[in-house]
Image (cartoon, rainbow, N blue to C red):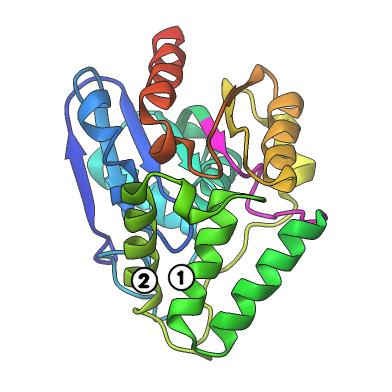
Amino acid sequence: MMGLFWIERGTGMPVVLLHGGFLDHTMWDDQIPVLSERHRVIAYDARGHGRSPNADGPYRLTDDLAALLRHLGTGPAVLVGVSMGAGLAVDTALEHPDLVRALVVTGAGTSEPCFEDPWTLRALAAWHGAMAAGDLEGSVEGHLTLGIGPGRDPAGLDPEVVRRLRAMARGTMSKHAVGEPDHVVPVTDTWRRIGSIRVPVLAVHGALDSPDHIAMAERLATTAAGGRSVTIENAGHYPNMERPDEYNRVLEDFLASL
């Protein structure tokens, strides 16, 4: 399994939790114990993130996920993803449809993002500038800014959520060096293909996420057959962390509907 780190809890319908970029599986700490009471929950660290090793050659995130699910012998699974994890979930529905029973996405529509909003473009430029300069703490803060959403100050958020986001980002970013090769092979032509997705799709928006992130997930939900969306108030890019009780209720209701 290319040394991927994963955990598995519970029995029942398989539910795979897919973390955001520069984070790791612990972003799901508020979901795993709840979901595993009724479902077989799998959460893992993508290559180059958390406790999984960095890549040493070309790879696709979706093929890693497919290999892990086949290794674990799961039938079609419900893929639940935030940000990068949402794009990965959709890629897998396109590239490995036999492994996907339903999709739950937040903050992305596919792995090919469309950014147009001025706030998002400024925040991305500041974050990427810090990464290019090898400024670890600046990179962590730039990532946090995007995650909490426009017009929000970390000081006004739950300090434990902010601590966890910073710790995950710092842990993954410190595994990488400025100028190292990016071995990820992108999945292409995804937006044109999302109309072919035939499994149930739920987009869960954090109401305070950036307009671009909400729009991408909404576009998926309105294009895929059987797609719908819900909004969680008072949450940014990571509603599962900021509003775990409400997010868990939404997710449990969706899983029960399957």
**Residue 23 found in image quarter:** bottom left
Q: Nearer the viewer, residue 110 or 129?
A: 129
Dot 2 amino acid type: Arg
Instruction: For mark 2, give the secondary structure.
Output: helix
Dot 1 amino acid type: Val
Task: Please tell me the numbered disc located at residue 170.
Answer: 2
Q: Which range of residues does the magenta coloring cover?
A: 104-116
Q: Which residue is the site of mark 1? A: 140
- Quadrant (top left, top right, bottom left, bottom right) of the N terminus: bottom left
**Label 2 environment density (alpha carbons within 10 Å; few <14, some 14–19, many ≥20):** many
Q: Does 205 sit left or right of 211 as displayed?
A: left
The reply to whether dot 1 and dot 2 touch (C-beta < 8 Å) is yes
Q: Does 216 sit left or right of 85 as displayed?
A: right
Instruction: For mark 1, give the secondary structure.
Output: helix
Q: Identify the residue shown where x is 63% and y is 53%.
A: 111
Cα separation, mark 1 vs mark 2, equals 6 Å
Q: Is residue 161 magenta?
A: no
